[in-house]
Amino acid sequence: MNKKRIILIIILILIIVGVIITNALLSKGKTYQKIIYQISYPSQALFTEKELDKFVNDTCGMLVGKMIHSVDLDEIETKIEAFPYLESVEVLANTRGHLIVKAVQHKVIANVFNQKNESYYISETGFLVPSSSVGCERVLIANGNITQSYRQGFNVKKHPKSRLYSIWKLAQFIEKDAFWKAQIAQIYINLQQEMELVPVVGEHIILFGRLNNMEEKFNNLKNIYTKGFKITGWNKFESINLKFGNQIPCEKRN
């Protein structure tokens, strides 16, 4: 290593140390003046900034007016992560006395209604998210023989044998495909614990069954939608059964 490079490294280290010391000196004796929220909503907002601010005050205490050096930012971040609508949180502070909360809301892909008529969402990453007073853009409805209630922190990915896992996987597939997102409105869990799909257009029911061969089933259904229905129309059939591979029984309407 040549002498110039060594000098450059020493200068960089001194600059970093200087910035740290300067920030520490500026922060000492200063209090937080305000909290700034930077919220990223991937779709329709499920909560307001006012609701998040109330949660922060209730769980972390009144942070405005506290000495900057006395607040543990990691602890604050952990507490805010418990706000059930958030996928991620980052808490920062600057020397102007601003506490900055960067929050990303969960993206929800299914709205579940259980047998008790309780409602909650499933997020893209598999977390259960409580229902919202603010509302939500159109997402898949999932109902029928669903018994599980909302549990904070519950992730369906860890429970692959559950009905909610099947709903989540199916909703994920539909969410990522623009064609199916426009076509499918509802997932219904029947008495046999199999899934039925209710389309946006047409009066037929799609007997989907279980998760096996999911992509093949949707390919077969797409062929019917884009080719078969051009000949027969949308309302000729009562049901379309995708449970038997490439053999697709369709029950005619009386």
Image: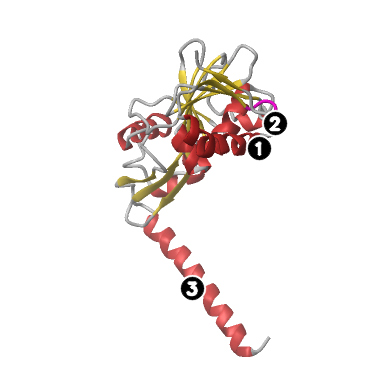
Distance between the alpha carbons at the discs numbered 2 and 1: 8 Å
Do residues under tags 2 and 1 come within 8 Å of each other at their CB atoms? yes
Residue type at mark 2 is Gly
Residue found 57% across the figure and 13% down from its top: 145
Query: Viewer-nearest of labels 3 and 1?
Result: 1
Residue 61, quarter of picture: top left
Q: Which numbered circle lies on residue 164?
A: none
* SS label for mark 2: loop
| Horizontal side, residue 11 vs residue 97: left or right | right
| Residue hosting label 2 | 245
| Horizontal side, residue 196 vs residue 76: left or right | right
Q: Is residue 125 visible?
A: no
| Residue hosting label 3 | 15
Q: Residues within 10 Å of mark 2 (few under 14, many from 20)?
A: few
Residue found 30% across the figure and 34% down from its top: 50
Q: Residues within 10 Å of mark 1 (few under 14, many from 20)?
A: few
Q: Earlier in the sequence, mark 2 or mark 1?
A: 1
| Horizontal side, residue 226 vs residue 47: left or right | right
| Residue hosting label 1 | 216
Do residues under tags 2 and 3 come within 8 Å of each other at their CB atoms? no
